[in-house]
Amino acid sequence: MENARPLQGIRVANFGWVWAGPVLGQTLAFLGAEVYKIESRARVDMLRTLPPFDRGVRDPDRSLSNHACWASNGSVSLDLKKPEAVKLALALVATCDVVTENFVPGVMDRFGLGYAKLCEVKPDIVMFSMPTAGLTGPLRDVRTYGLSLAGTTGLDSLVGYVDGPPIPMEQAFSDPFNGILGGFGVLAALRHRDRTGNGQHVDYSQQEAVMQFVGPAFMDYAMNGRSAGPMGNRHPLAVAAPHGVFPCAGDDRWISIAVFEEEEWRGLVRAMGDPDWARATDFAGPEERVRNIERLHERLATWTPGFDDRELAARLQREGVAAAPVMSVADLLEDPHYRARGTFIEVRHPLGFEETIYGAYVKTSRFEANVQPGPAIGRDNEYVFKELLGVSDERYRQLVEEKVIY
């Protein structure tokens, strides 16, 4: 089929929640999968409780965070504490190719939706579990959110000023990272199923995935016995100078500059107008610049404040120097590059208001991802239960009244 999306025809029951779960569903949906979030008003997803809300109305269906992070997922509402809801969930799974979840190990089993049970209704099902620390081991029951993973993986121990205490990043970047990387795990399992006819239960440890970020520090310890600590903005292998962020004109405006090669240093000197201090023996070569990096940074920081950050970045780039403005969130939304690529898009929500959400980070030459804002709770109930599962109108109304579908 011309311009068919690679996962067209694949159906996913997404039991994930908060941020990692929705981004996993979002990634699969951008590739063409039909994804349904299983949720309930009996226990509203935390992401739906986060502001901002449209017109300040605190409603789980009006959370911009939900609309951005759950983009392109559908929604089916079932109170899984009720046996009839579990039966309906199993009936849906029987029509699916993939089940995803990011609960603590054992939660899906307690619901009656563990891997063995799912295999009874769909023998070749791919179940993708992404708990914090994996399905086995002493930490299997640990409960964390994205911020915690920067600590349990060693990342926080590396962040901070030189010779100072660690300063946590305070950004739950591990959630979207694991959602996107997890999507590739699902693809591999589907590929295996297509080749062998066998599904599988994928044990994806979020912290083991995030731990890849400390690879250089791990190798340094394993090979040299050195335990890394905070290094500020210095290069971890001390092979670049200058290497940091420097103030620019305006309120809290900064530019990042990194110089590795001699030609890059000469480009920086040209951009600065060949000042006398740059010819000092302290900065004569790479080793001298690294050894005297603090004085080098002080010198550079007296020059950069005279320039707009974007203009200076362009000037340095023209001279072959790696430089970029340190952008705020507001800058990202207005940045011409991101705007040209549709990194953020304007959409009209079905409830009648305009909003900005993430565009598709999956871009190919063969198809364009369909990006829709995150759904209202139970948006797809009638289609899934009545058309897909064949529930009669009368039975459907009864299930809604009994708050099984809720």
Image (spheres, rainbow, N blue to C red):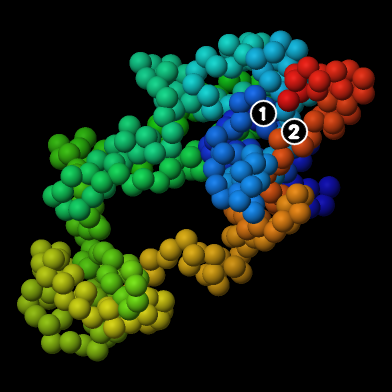
Residue 375 pos. (x, y %) = 71, 41
**What residue appears at the point 21 percent right and 74 percent down from the top-left corner?**
301
| Residue at disc 1, secondary structure | loop
Check the image and report above or below for 161 versus 185: below
What residue is drawn where x is 60% and y is 54%?
358
Q: Amino acid at mark 1?
A: Arg
What residue do we see at 35% from left, 16% from top?
138
Q: Answer yes or no: do the residues labelled 2 and 1 have beta carbons within 8 Å?
A: yes
**Left or right: residue 211 compared with residue 111:** left
142 is higher (above) or lower (below) than 23? above
Residue at 61 percent of width and 43 percent of height: 58
Q: Secondary structure at mark 2?
A: loop
- Outermost residue on the bottom side: it is 273
Quarter of the figure with residue 172: top left
**In this rendering, would 46 be left or right of 325?**
right
| Quadrant in the picture for the C terminus | top right
Q: CA distance from mark 2 to mark 1?
A: 9 Å
Q: Position of residue 343 (x, y in %)?
A: 59, 60
Q: Earlier in the sequence, mark 2 or mark 1?
A: 1
Mark linked to residue 378: 2
Residue 84: x %, y % from top left: 75, 12
* Direction from residue 112 to residue 33 in the image, left or right: right
Q: Is residue 138 left or right of residue 17?
A: left
Task: Name the residue that disc number 1 marks.
Answer: 41
Quarter of the image where one finds residue 15:
top right
Name the amino acid, label 2: Gly
Along the line of sight, the residue nearer the viewer: 43 or 343: 43
User: In x, y percent, where is residue 101?
Assistant: 58, 27
Tell which of 378 and 55 is nearer to you.
55
